[in-house]
Image: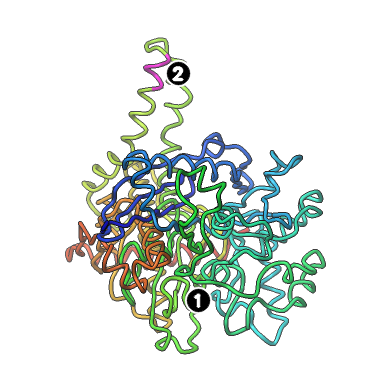
């Protein structure tokens, strides 16, 4: 009798998709594969100057096939494929798309192949700032506060704002759009051979945190809420959903088409999807009142609390509180920073301008050598900046930054806010600017922790997950000092994909609950950053200056 049973976790990030093949009996990684989105890498369908970030569904489907087949090939092919029991998927969010009645994204239909408004609107797309502001104003006119379970403020990063902006912007898409679907809902629907969007099992996580669905309201806000906001939304609630599902529920089994494409069998269960940070928190072995920080291009901060402890308490200024959005039976609380790794990437891009624009013109090296040098030096920039910035002594008038380079997600969402750097003089160099940016991202993290505690939600510890957590001891140590709190770093490299695999194991019936699967498949922590006592006073004073700068910028924004 075979004792090993395998599951696949698929994690759709901002730049790539990664799949992991896991032995569900012990959590051991058998194989992993990463696929960078080719169209996204070329910058197609995006316009950063207007905060437009769109992704083509073909990037997603090509990546799905590529990574899963690669994992199976690494592990031995057909023999191990026969023992795969389930697949579960997480994605970025809110990343929705216009679909037809059959649930097909419009970008996959003739005439829409290159229309950015027919594609997935990535989480960090902020073209719907106006619509979000209108939703916030509109909500104040109703006796029931339909924003009460999303922190009291609706964001341009979310479901309804993006739908309304799309309908207003593109007539052809408006006329062809039957429904509006999150990425994490579409992939399971696709894998199970769905043919009618009305039968799609919608994620409790996505619906609760981004689409105003709440148990307390009996579902979505009423039709009148949306049709009175804009007649273009008339009828949409009837074409969306009433019921939602936690991610321990099966969305169905693999269709024949997708079983053949992936090299699997049709008995493979497919779990209901969720957002990356929420499944990542599970992969990172989240505990009640321990804040899981998934640190990548942005951060998504997840905290779970027993539902009985929340008991009607409303947390203001966060990104939602939803029963079962992380672990069934617990309330999931979400916060985050709109730019984290993106802040460092922006600075790296700034410093790399000569490499990208002058090196290729050099008469001293050939084109191949120039390209290799560009890649080598670009890769070294952030690690070397980190190493040398750590050696700079502290001063009372050090450069100071504000981390709102892509707006502010939490606390109190405002995507129109801008980043800032002050205290610059002729002695300011790249190292000092980088240190100020790093401090700003850490102060943004403290601002979130302080909001939870001020709202009566204790934060007992920090769990670090994601690329920045794994790769940057400098930033993690700084964050521990700023927070005056230890930070445990989960050892698994692809923690969100592991979280998806944990849910897959529950969907397959290998474990009865998510908690049991976490115990059986969790891989523990490989680093811990303790606060350095001699630096706490410096950072405490600096945090006060950060808050004052943020208040000034917010009060004087155009």
Residue farthest toward the top in the current orientation of the protein:
363
| Residue that appears at 43% across and 15% down | 367
Q: Quadrant of residue 248?
A: bottom left
Is 485 displayed left or right of 67 in the figure?
Answer: left
Q: Nearer the viewer, residue 353 or 491?
A: 491
Q: Is residue 368 magenta?
A: yes
Q: How far from the left and from the top, in percent, is residue 410?
A: 48, 67
Is 208 displayed left or right of 374 in the figure?
Answer: right
Q: Is residue 538 visible?
A: no
Q: How far from the left and from the top, in percent, is residue 156?
A: 62, 61
- Cα–Cα gap, marks 1 and 2: 52 Å
| Residue that appears at 49% across and 76% down | 321
Query: Up-down: is 333 above or below 352?
Result: below
Q: Nearer the viewer, residue 460 or 284?
A: 284
Residue 67 — which label?
none
| Residue that appears at 36% across and 66% down | 282
Query: Up-down: is 77 above or below 549?
Result: above
| Nearest-to-viewer mark from 1 and 2 | 1
Q: Which residue is mark 1?
A: 322
Q: Which residue is mark 2?
A: 360
Main SS of the magenta part reads helix
Q: How far from the left and from the top, in percent, is residue 180?
A: 68, 60
Magenta residues, start to end: 367-371
Q: Quadrant of residue 6?
A: bottom left
Q: How far from the left and from the top, in percent, is residue 486?
A: 23, 66
Q: Quadrant of residue 103?
A: bottom right
- For mark 2, does the 10 Å Cα neighbourhood hold few (<14), some (14 to 19), or many (20 or more) residues? some
The image quadrant where one finds the N terminus is bottom left
Q: Is residue 186 visible?
A: yes
Q: Secondary structure at mark 1?
A: strand
Q: Are marks 1 and 2 in contact (CB under 8 Å)?
A: no
- For mark 1, does the 10 Å Cα neighbourhood hold few (<14), some (14 to 19), or many (20 or more) residues? many
């Amino acid at each position: 009798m075979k004792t090993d049973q395998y599951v696949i976790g698929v994690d759709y990030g901002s730049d790539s998709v990664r799949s992991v093949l896991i032995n569900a009996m012990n959590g051991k990684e058998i194989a992993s594969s990463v696929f960078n989105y080719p169209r996204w890498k070329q910058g197609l369908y995006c316009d950063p100057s207007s905060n437009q970030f769109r992704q083509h569904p073909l990037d997603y489907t090509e990546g799905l096939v590529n990574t899963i087949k690669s994992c199976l090939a690494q592990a031995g092919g057909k023999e191990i494929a026969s023992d795969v029991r389930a697949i579960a998927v997480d994605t970025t969010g809110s990343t929705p798309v216009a679909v037809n009645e059959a649930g097909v994204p419009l970008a996959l239909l003739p005439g829409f192949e290159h229309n950015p408004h027919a594609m997935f609107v990535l989480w960090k797309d902020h073209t719907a700032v106006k619509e979000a502001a209108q939703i916030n104003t509109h909500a104040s006119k109703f006796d029931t506060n339909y924003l009460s379970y999303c922190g009291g403020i609706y964001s341009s990063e979310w479901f309804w704002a993006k739908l309304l902006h799309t309908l207003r912007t593109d007539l052809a898409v408006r006329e062809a759009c039957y429904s509006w679907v999150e990425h994490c809902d579409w992939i399971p629907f696709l894998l199970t051979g769905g043919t009618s969007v009305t039968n799609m099992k919608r994620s409790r996580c996505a619906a609760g945190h981004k689409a105003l669905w709440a148990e307390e309201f009996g579902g979505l806000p009423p039709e009148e809420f949306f049709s009175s906001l804009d007649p273009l939304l008339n009828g949409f609630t009837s074409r969306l959903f009433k019921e939602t599902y936690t991610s321990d529920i099966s969305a169905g089994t693999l269709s024949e088409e997708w079983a053949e494409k992936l090299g699997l069998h049709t008995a493979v269960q497919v779990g209901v999807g969720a957002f990356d940070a929420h499944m990542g928190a599970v992969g990172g072995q989240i505990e009640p009142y321990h804040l899981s920080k998934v640190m990548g291009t942005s951060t998504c901060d997840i905290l779970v609390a027993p539902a009985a402890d929340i008991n009607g308490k409303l947390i203001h200024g966060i990104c939602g509180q939803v029963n079962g959005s992380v672990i069934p039976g617990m309330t999931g609380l979400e916060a985050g920073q709109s730019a984290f790794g993106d802040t460092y990437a922006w600075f790296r891009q700034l410093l790399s301008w000569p490499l990208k624009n002058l090196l290729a013109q050099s008469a001293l090296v050939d084109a191949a050598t120039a390209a290799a040098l560009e890649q080598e030096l670009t890769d070294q920039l952030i690690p070397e900046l980190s190493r040398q910035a750590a050696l700079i002594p502290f001063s009372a008038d050090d450069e100071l930054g504000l981390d709102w380079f892509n707006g502010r997600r939490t606390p109190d969402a405002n995507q129109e806010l801008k980043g800032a750097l002050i205290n610059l003089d002729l002695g300011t160099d790249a190292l000092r600017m980088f240190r100020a940016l790093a401090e700003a991202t850490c102060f943004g993290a403290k601002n979130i922790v302080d909001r939870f505690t001020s709202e009566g939600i204790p934060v007992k510890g920090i769990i670090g997950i994601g690329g920045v957590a794994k790769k940057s001891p400098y930033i993690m140590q700084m964050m521990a000092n700023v927070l005056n709190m230890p930070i445990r770093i989960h050892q698994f490299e692809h923690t969100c994909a592991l979280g998806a695999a944990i849910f897959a194991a529950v969907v397959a019936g290998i474990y009865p609950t998510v908690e049991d699967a976490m115990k059986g498949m969790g891989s523990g922590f490989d680093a811990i950053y303790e606060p350095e006592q001699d630096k706490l006073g410096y950072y405490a004073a600096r945090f006060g200056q950060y808050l004052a700068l943020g208040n000034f910028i917010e009060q004087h924004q155009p």
